[in-house]
Amino acid sequence: MVAGVVAVVVSGLVVVDVVADRQRTARILAQPGGIHAITTSPKVIWERPLESAMVATVGGLAVVSWGDRLAAIDPADGSVAWSAGPLGGQTDCAPSADAEPIRSSTLVCVTTPKPGAESVALTPRPHVVRVFGADGAVASRRTITAEVVVAVSDHEVAQATPGVSGATVRVEDATSGELRWLRRVERAPVDRSWTVDENGDLISPPFAVWTWNGFIMVGGGGLTAAFDEAGGPVSPAEDAAVVVRLGDGMSLRKSTPAEDSVTEVVGQDGPRWRAEGRALAPMVTDGTTEDVVMIQEGGFTRAHDARSGRVRWGRLESSYETAVARVDTVLVLSRSSGIEGYDTQTGRLLWTHHRVPVGERPLTDGDRLVVSTVDPGVLDPHDTVTEAIDLLNGEVVWRYRPDGGGMALLGIGGRLVAIESHGDQGALVGLG
């Protein structure tokens, strides 16, 4: 009878473990950069041509632009789930596949007619805004006449009107046109993005609006600004990318220039704590609430308790460049000589890997960090290798080297997808 009781208890523990594993996997897949596990060196499963830099996502599909058509590609096998067009011009869509969770149910696309050969300055033009469902059906369509119109999320567009003294930025509902927020960006006397032409005259890059890590960026034409999703200004604009959601309603903001950095953690009820120094915000996480916030100041790096700001541990080290990942209690930091894994609770060094991460965002399946790397001091894209690194011990589980050299990694629909360069032709490649 006792043995039967033990058997029942053990069986219950197994069920609990299975449920916990499924919940953890689902949480990781819901994060930007979350993918299903790949335990051996991946092979190319499918390949599709890539004619523009845009790779958006809806319903776990990769959306690309082919001419004036859109194609939604299933990342599992490379098949075209649906296509749309001709659309009548260049089309860009949001959300971007490198910045958003995998299951957006709508896709906002803006089609811009190509200007005539004689047109140089921005002029008001009709832009067609379409909202697609995950099945490719057009849920809404309308036209906005403005100088600049861009899709900024799965439900909003931004339109901008540049002028002599600055620009007006309006964010509105993509379907109804209902105003979300309106902001004015003033032109600075001299913008840091200005350069000198061959005659010694100051010139500026073209005016543009784009999204970066969930923020709306304005630049060019002597303008620099950034706004969060509610229209709140992020200052300076160059530091917008270090703002990160910590979980439990908390967010981290680096609010002043790097030479006089202050890191602030804000909760739903307002500011929680502030500390001098530059924050190292993880590029990819497992979706759990951040336990510590890493801050650099002078020649010291400190781990602060995310809720209270209390210093838990520190290291006499100031050469960390980025926080690559934080999964469970493992924090991965990079420096010019490679990457290192630390225990977030104690600060103990767990492992060292002597290659340097490159590219925008690494990926993780919860047990391994999947990241493109090069040897320290090497910038040749042909040296780029994608590696899967065990988060507990730093061992390389597998390596993948693309045939064409440089590549960028994406996690779409939980699948590992790469943008590769094959000579002059780009390609979207499914790996597994």
Image: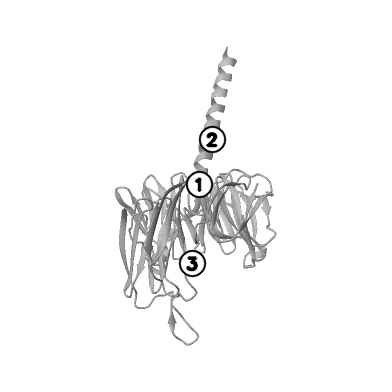
Q: Which residue is mark 1?
A: 136
Q: What amino acid type should be assigned to the residue bearing mark 1?
A: Gly
> Disc 1 and disc 2: Cα gap in Å?
30 Å
Mark number for residue 64? none
Mark 1 / mark 2, whichever is N-terminal: 2
The x and y percentages for residue 177 are 34, 54
Q: Is 132 displayed left or right of 356 in the figure? A: left
Q: Determine whether the residue tagged by mark 2 lies in a helix, strand or loop.
A: helix
Mark number for residue 114? 3
Q: Is 181 displayed left or right of 390 in the figure? A: left
Asked where in the image residue 263 lies, by quadrant, the reply is bottom left
* Location of the N terminus (image quadrant): top right
Mark number for residue 22? 2
> Disc 3 and disc 2: Cα gap in Å?
48 Å
* Residue beneath the point at 49% across and 41% down: 27
Q: What amino acid type should be assigned to the residue bearing mark 2?
A: Arg
Tell me if residue 407 comes above or below residue 13 in the rendering: below
Label 3 CA crowd tier, 10 Å (few <14, some 14–19, many 20+): few
Mark 3 / mark 2, whichever is N-terminal: 2
